[in-house]
Amino acid sequence: FYESAKQRLNEGGIFSQWVQGYAIDAESFALVLATMRTVFKHVNVYSGGTADYVVVGSDTPMVVDAERFARVQQAPIMKTYLERIAGIAAMAGKCYETAQAHFEASLVQAEALNFVNELGDTRRWHAMMLLRRQAPGDLETAQSLLLEAIAVYQRQGMPKHEKMAQLLLDGFH
C-alpha cells in the first residue's frame, strides 16, 4: 500500500495517514510505523492531544514551523474542525458528555463563521453520538440533527454525505 502511495507522490511530496489510536493496539501502531519507515526515508507522527494521530511519510526531510503550526491550530475555522474531531474521539471512547460539549462548541463556531460544510458534518456526527448514547430525548434530537444535515448537504451538492446521513435517518423507520 505505502509503495503504491509513494509512486503517486510528486517529488518532495508527503503521504499522510490518520490512525485512530482508540481503535488500534500499540503493537499494530508500531507495525504501521515500521512499515512506513521501510518505504519513506522520513516519518513523523503528530497528535492533536486526542487519541488520533497523523503519520506523515516523505523522502524529503520535513521541517515543521512550530510557531506557524500553533497559529494554524488557533485559526477559527481550524478550531471548529478540531472541536468536531475531539467530539468524534470522545464518542469513540464512550465519553458522551465530553463529546456533546465538543459537538455543541463546533456547531456554535461553525454558525458564527458560516462554515456551512462543517454545519452538516458536525450535525451528522453529533447524531451518531446520540444514537449510541440513547439517553432520554437522544433519538428525537438525532433525527432533527440528521434532517438538518441532509438539508445542508443538499444545498451544498454533497450527495455522498447526504446518503450517509440518510442511511442513519432510515434506521429510525
Image: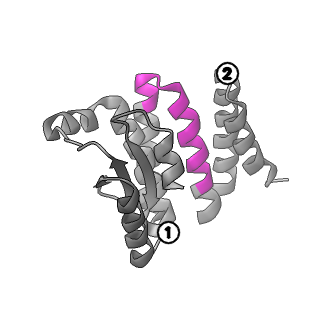
User: Which is the main secondary structure of the residues drawn in magenta?
Assistant: helix
Q: Where is residue 6 in the image (x, y as percent from the top left)?
A: 46, 46
User: Dot 2 corresponds to which residue?
Assistant: 155
Task: Please determine whether, in this image, residue 145 is positioned above or below residue 95.
Answer: above
Along the horizontal axis of the image, is 68 left or right of 124?
Answer: left
Disc 2 element: helix
Q: Where is residue 12 in the image (x, y as percent from the top left)?
A: 33, 35
Q: Give me the residue at 39% from left, 37% from top.
A: 80
Q: What residue type is labelled 2?
A: Arg
User: In the image, is residue 165 part of the stretch drawn in magenta?
Assistant: no
Disc 1 element: helix
Q: Nearer the viewer, residue 53 or 97?
A: 53
Q: Give the range drawn in magenta.
A: 110-128
In the rendered image, the quadrant that contains the N terminus is: bottom right
| Dots 1, 2 in contact, CB < 8 A | no
Along the horizontal axis of the image, is 173 left or right of 66?
Answer: right
User: Dot 1 corresponds to which residue?
Assistant: 23
Q: What residue type is labelled 1?
A: Ala
